[in-house]
Image (cartoon, rainbow, N blue to C red):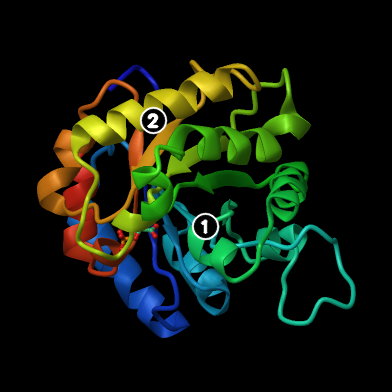
Amino acid sequence: MSDRRPLVAGNWKMHKTGAEATEYAAALLAELGDGPVEAEVAVCPPFTALQPAAAAFAGSQVAVLAQAVHEADAGAHTGEISAGMIAATGAAGTLVGHSERRAAGETDAQVAVRVRAAIDAGLSVILCVGESLDQREAGETEAWLTAQLRAALTPFEGVHEERLSIAYEPIWAIGTGRTATPQIAQETVAHVRAVSAGLIDGERVRILYGGSVKPDNASELMGQKDIDGVLVGGASLDAASFAAIVRAA
Ligand code: PGA
């Protein structure tokens, strides 16, 4: 871990209603207590729970982020929501380019304009990148991540954007219980940092690891030199388990 402040974010995916988000907030805040928390903490509820979550976490150390955003301000985009709409819920940011969104058709070009639109609207962004198992086994991981990063970060070339973080999430480790070893995670995150360095300020940008992070592996992962935090799916759904990961930071 470097002097970059760790970031621990929980991606709820398609889980929890507004009422459940409110209950979760009470439980998480009780777990974290009143003292300062070392890590920056965020949760990413589904769109329908953003507003109740933002209200329940208001004034606390926990930020609320959306899971996706559309690049347009408004318009004929059925089922989408804009960065301004996300901001109006009280949420502070959004994930962009999660592999589950990419698998549903989100392209590199869309990821790039969506990151830009969110930053321009004053939101923070966690840009997600990651390779499939086939790509890893074919030795294509680095080239693939380089291409994903170049596509998404070229609009920011030369600019350090405080509100932009990157999550490296190998697709083969998401929801599979198969975590990347700390060595593989560190090695790959170091590559992500090196590529980012050529585009934005790679020394300052926070890079997270995601993929089957649990309370019992979080601390070793976050102990790696280039890993500045974690993006947690399944293990973030329970407030006590997520709090244990926050404490591991
Ligand atoms: P997981 O999901 O922790 O359930 O593997 C991580 C993610 O998709 O962000």
Write down the residue under mark 2. 189
* Residue 50 percent coordinates (x, y): 54, 70
The C terminus lies in quadrant: top left
- Mark linked to residue 98: 1
Q: Callout 2, which amino acid?
A: Val
Where residue 127 sits, quadrant-wise, is top right
Q: In front here: 158 or 190? A: 190
Q: Callout 1, which amino acid?
A: His
- Position of residue 58 in the picture relative to residue 32 (left or right): right
Q: In front here: 38 or 73? A: 73
Q: Earlier in the sequence, mark 2 or mark 1?
A: 1
| 33 lies above or below 145 | below
Mark 2, residues whose alpha carbon is within 10 Å: few (<14), some, or many (≥20)? many
Can residue 86 be seen in the rendering of this structure?
A: yes
Q: In front here: 218 or 33? A: 218
> Please, what secondary structure does the residue beneath circle 1 have?
loop
- Position of residue 14 in the picture relative to residue 227 (left or right): right
* Residue 27 percent coordinates (x, y): 24, 67
Mark 1, residues whose alpha carbon is within 10 Å: few (<14), some, or many (≥20)? many
Residue at the extreme right:
75
- Mark linked to residue 245: none
Can residue 165 be seen in the rendering of this structure?
A: no
Determine whether the beta carbon of the residue marked 1 sits less than 8 angstroms from the nearest atom of ligand 1: yes
> Please, what secondary structure does the residue beneath circle 2 have?
helix
* Residue 55 percent coordinates (x, y): 50, 67
Q: What residue is rendered at 51% in x and 76% in y?
A: 49
Q: In front here: 32 or 135? A: 135
Q: Which image quarter has ligand 1?
A: bottom left
Q: CA distance from mark 2 to mark 1?
A: 16 Å
Q: What residue is rendered at 85% in x and 61% in y?
A: 73
